[in-house]
Image: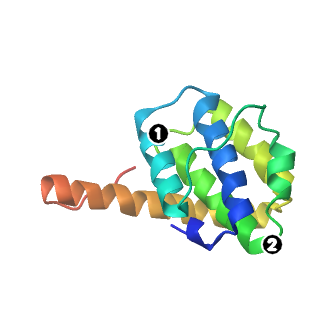
């Protein structure tokens, strides 16, 4: 959604963090689709993954508060792509968010927005598929 606002070096860092996120617990088809959509949105190819992705090094690429917020919410959405946020994914997100240095109030705001957006997305899919609007729990 907002990935096109990142600087080129931030896009590369995001692509590496995003790949680590989807590969961390095994690549799910929904996460994979969203991952490739993110790469397309940023106008980049797959990242060079010859070396291990160091979360702290990648997070340092995001120099502004805005770019860190973009990366955070986009990674949250990626983690939710399969409809489930497992403990391992939550742990990895916590490590990334910790590296970004966000406080709990910012984190709470981000989760509220992400869950709201995800609900809207799911309701829209229901409407398209079934012709009815429903609320997901």
Q: Which residue is drawn at 38% across and 63% down?
A: 120
Give the x, y percent position of residue 8. Answer: 69, 64
In this view, the residue farthest toward the top is 26
Give the x, y percent position of residue 87. Answer: 65, 32
> What is the quadrant of residue 73 in the picture?
bottom right
Q: Can residue 76 be seen in this view?
A: yes
Give the x, y percent position of residue 118. Answer: 45, 57
Q: Residue at x 24, y 54 (%)?
A: 126
**Lower sequence index among marks 2 and 1:** 1
Disc 1 target residue = 32
Q: Residues within 10 Å of mark 2 (few under 14, many from 20)?
A: few
User: Distance of mark 2 from mark 1, alpha carbons?
Assistant: 27 Å
> What is the quadrant of residue 106 in the picture?
bottom right
Which secondary structure, mark 2?
Answer: loop
Disc 2 target residue = 64
Residue 130 circle label: none
In this view, the residue farthest toward the left is 131
Viewer-proximal residue among 135 and 42: 42
Viewer-proximal residue among 73 and 2: 2
- Looking at the image, residue 57 sits to the left or right of residue 36; the answer is right
């Amino acid at each position: 959604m907002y990935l096109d606002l990142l600087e080129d070096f931030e896009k590369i860092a995001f692509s590496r963090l995003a790949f680590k996120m989807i590969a961390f617990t095994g690549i799910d088809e929904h996460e994979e689709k969203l991952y490739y959509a993110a790469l397309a949105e940023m106008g980049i190819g797959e990242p060079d993954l010859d070396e291990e992705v160091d979360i702290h090094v990648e997070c340092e690429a995001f120099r502004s508060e805005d770019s860190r917020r973009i990366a955070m919410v986009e990674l949250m959405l990626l983690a939710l792509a399969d409809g489930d946020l497992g403990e391992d994914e939550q742990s990895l997100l916590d490590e990334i968010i910790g590296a970004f240095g966000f406080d709990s109030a910012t984190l709470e705001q981000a989760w509220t927005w992400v869950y709201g957006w995800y609900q809207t997305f799911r309701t829209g899919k229901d409407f398209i598929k079934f012709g009815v609007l429903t609320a997901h729990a």
